Amino acid sequence: MGVGHQSRFSRMALITLSPLLSSTPNSAKHALIQEHTTHQIFTSLHLHRHKIHGGGGRRFSWDYQERFNFSAFSSSNGGWIDVVAGAPKEYEDAEFIVVNFYRFVFVQNPEEEVLRHLSFMQGRDIHGRIYLNEQGINAQYSGPSKDALAYVEWVKEDHRFSDILIQISPAANGHAFPKLKLRYKPSLVQLGEGISHLPLLDQSMRATPLTPSEWKNKLERVNNIDNSLDTVNSTANCILLDVRNGYEWDVGHFQGAQRPDVDCFRSTSFGLSSESQTEVVASDPLANVDREKTDVLMYCTGGIRCDVYSTILRQQGFKNLYTLKGGVSHYLEKEGSTGWVGNLFVFDGRLSLPPSTYKPEINADAIGKQKTSHSFAKCHVCGSHVSELRHRNCANLDCNLLFLCCLKCVEDMRGCCCTNCTSADRIRPVLRGHQRYKKWHTYRDLEPVEG
């Protein structure tokens, strides 16, 4: 995990601690200490009164659930740096979690790989979407931590996937996915005519990944730290590009990011419009920018969409492409809600997660500021501000639109997104709280709802 800190010489440095995943509580963990600013290993370390000399990637161990302070000698500035380190949350075996990871790497026999993974899943309680093909793996799944972590540890035993970035979040209500889909899929993400032709295995064709700390610092530099990030898109040499769907932006986004005029990632066309397409150009933040000099800062939920789309932009001549490593979820875990407004939309049963899901220690002041900054979130029906940053599906099964709605309109429209839908043939009951609609047969024989 990345730990940002202030040194005694008033400069920021990033320390990387990389605990080995283990489902065994209180087991000894190991970490490699490295300063990203110079990529030099610290030469000395103080930890619980024990001093370890010598650089070269020396390892140390600590109790996984323990938070501690230590000092490290920086080879880049010749001074001691104070560090506060804390271990990631430890989950009970039966506690449900959601795990996300992906990796672009050549897989020679993906069908055989699928069979291996299915075999490992036997007897394990895992639901989700896990896709493999010749370009690698893309996985989002839920399960009790004992099973969920056992699978990812097994995956990491394969040298091709040993360095994947694992993202874990709690699933308080059990499974976040209805069932397990583990199969070969021609495209790891859906985009246009597919992605199998894209040079995803050539890292030089993908955007440069920025750690959460680097991403935050870059945004702050663009805006001279004290300026509002609302000016970032008008900055001549920098574009903040939200590579998600418009409805995801509606519940949360980085300050200054333009709302994407996109309803489905497969139809994304940023940077592909021509001058003759007047309407398209107006909604394309990359239209008419200098492709040689403009920095394009791309972000999405977990990182994979940015990696994919950056190869397209690279082919279009964009030179300075940067992505947020691990996406917004990784950023919220490491940096909290700094620069972020609202919640994070996720493609599972939870739908919308506040920043505190990823970083529970976010203080009350930060949460209060978040609540007062939700003015961007509007009711789809009446346009008023919504009190909860969470989508609902239209009660009309044949519409099923995902939309934000105020409580008054939920009641007045009986859970529908518009007047026309209230008179449709297949109307489902209004759902309360954080419930999700089930299959139609669940509601088919219910008495019709009166207007």
Image (cartoon, grey):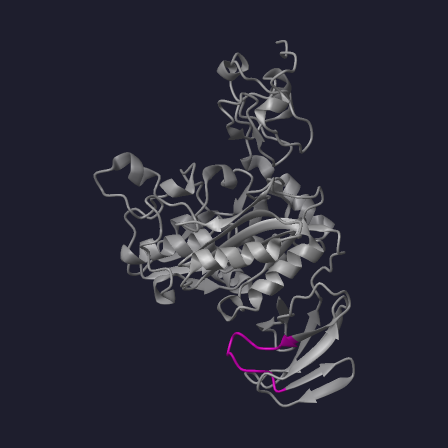
Most extreme residue toward the top, as rendered?
A: 450
Provide residue 236's location: percent of width, then percent of height: 35, 54
In this picture, residue 294 sits left or right of residue 334: left
Res. 252 in view = yes
In this picture, residue 179 sits left or right of residue 64: left
Most extreme residue toward the bottom, as rendered?
A: 54
Indicate the quadrant where residue 51 lies. bottom right
- Tell which of 424 and 274 is nearer to you: 424
Taking the spot 60% from the left edge, 42% from the top edge, the residue there is 177
By secondary structure, the bulk of the magenta-drawn segment is best described as loop
Indicate the quadrant where residue 156 lies. bottom right
In this picture, residue 396 sits left or right of residue 370: left
Q: Quadrant of the C terminus?
A: top right
In this picture, residue 307 sits left or right of residue 319: right
> Which segment is the magenta one?
31-43
Res. 224 in view = no
Q: Quadrant of the N terminus?
A: bottom right
Provide residue 388's location: percent of width, then percent of height: 64, 34
Most extreme residue toward the left, as rendered?
A: 276
Rendered view: 42 above or below 386: below
Provide residue 342's location: percent of width, then percent of height: 59, 43
Taking the spot 49% from the left edge, 50% from the top edge, the residue there is 229
Provide residue 241's location: percent of width, then percent of height: 42, 50
- Tell which of 89 and 181 is nearer to you: 181
The number of discs equals: 0
Taking the magenta stretch, the answer to whether it contains residue 42 is yes
- Tell which of 70 and 237 is nearer to you: 70
Taking the magenta stretch, the answer to whether it contains residue 49 is no
Rendered view: 404 above or below 99: above
- Tell which of 352 and 195 is nearer to you: 195
